Image (cartoon, grey):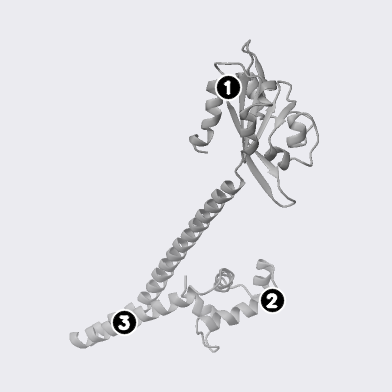
Amino acid sequence: MQMKELDWIYSLQNKYSKEAFDIENFKTSLLKELFNVIQDGISIEDPDLNILYCNPSMRRWYKDNDGEKCYQRYHCKKQPCKNCPVKRSLKTGKLEASAASYDVGKKNEGMQYLYALPLYDSDKKIICIIEYVRDVSKECKAELSVELLQRQNEILQQYLLEKEEQEIEIYQTISKNLNDSIKPVLDYLNKILEKDLFDMISRQLTFSKEYLLRNNISKLSQLTEQELTVINFIKAGYTSKEIAQKLNITTKAVDYHRNKIRKDLDISPKVSLKKYLINLP
C-alpha cells in the first residue's frame, strides 16, 4: 500500500497526540461523517475490544455476524486473534498493521490489510483504537496472477532448455555412431581411390550424414516422454510384457507405442526395432 493512502491516519495520529479524543463528541462530529463515506472499513473499539462505532462499509461486510467484540463480529471467533493489530497497538501505543484473510464464498478467500491507531484521553491514556480495514483481494489476485505467469514462463524456459540439451545429446550420439560406421569405409576408400574422387565421395557422405542427423533429431523430438522411455527399455532388451510391468500399463499399450515409434521414425517392418534403436541415444 502506498504511503499516501495512509496519510489521513497519520494526520489523526498527529492531531490526537496533541489533544484528547472524545468518543461522545465524535458521534456528532464532521470526522464521523467523513468515516461514513469512506469506502474502506473503519471501526472504533475500546481497550476491551468492544465495538464503539463501525462505518457503513464494515456494517455491510459483516451484516450477518453478531457480537459486541471486534473478534466476534468481524472474525467469528471466541477469543482475540493471535496477530491482532488492535491488541498490539494497545500494548505499544503506536500504529500497528497486519494482513488477514476472510471468506467471500464457498470457494473464494479475500485478503484485507488492517491498521490500528491508538487515541488518547486528556490523561494520555488510550481511550480507544481506530481500526482501518482495506480490502486488497483484487490486488493480491493480480499479484498472484503475475507470479503464476512468471512461474509458468520459468517452467516453459526450463522445458525448452532441457529439450535443447536433449537434442544436442541426441545429435552428438547419432553423429558419433554414424562416424564410427563411416570411418572404416572412408579409410578403405582413401587407400584405393584418387584424391579428387575420394574428396567428392567424402563430401557426399558428409552431406548425407548431416541430412540423416537433422531428419532423426526432428523425428525424435516429436516423441512423447513415455515413448522415449519405451525406446530405452527396448534397447535394453526388455520384452513388451516386461515393459508393461515396469510402466504399469497393458501389453497392448506397449505394442501401440512400438507401432507408433516405427511410424514416427519411418522404420520399415522388415527392420529389427531393437537393432535400429541401438544406434540412438
Q: Which amino acid does the dot numbered 3 rest on?
A: Phe
Residue type at mark 1? Lys
Closer to viewer: mark 1 or mark 2:
1
Residue 98 sits above or below residue 15 on the image: below
Report if residue 194 is visible in the image: no
Residue at 55% from the left image edge and 79% from the top image edge: 261
50 vs 18, nearest the viewer: 18
Residues at marks 3 and 1, CA–CA distance in whole angstroms: 79 Å
Where residue 251 is drawn, which disc sits there? 2
* Mark 3 or mark 2, earlier in chain: 3
Label 1: element kind: loop
| Front residue of 113 and 123 | 123
Q: Is residue 210 visible?
A: yes
Per the image, the residue denoted by label 1 is 94
Residue at mark 3: 207
Q: In the rendered structure, are the residues bearing label 3 and label 1 in contact, judged by CB atoms less than 8 Å apart?
A: no
User: x, y percentage for residue 8?
Assistant: 54, 31
Where's residue 18, x and y in %?
A: 54, 16
Q: Residues within 10 Å of mark 2 (few under 14, many from 20)?
A: some
Q: Quadrant of residue 25?
A: top right
Task: Name the amino acid, label 2.
Answer: Thr
- The answer for how far apart the CA atoms under marks 1 and 2 are is 71 Å
Question: Could you tell which of marks 1 and 2 lies nearer the N-terminus?
Answer: 1
The disc at residue 161 is none
Residue 202 at x, y percent in the picture: 27, 82
Front of the two marks 3 and 1: 1
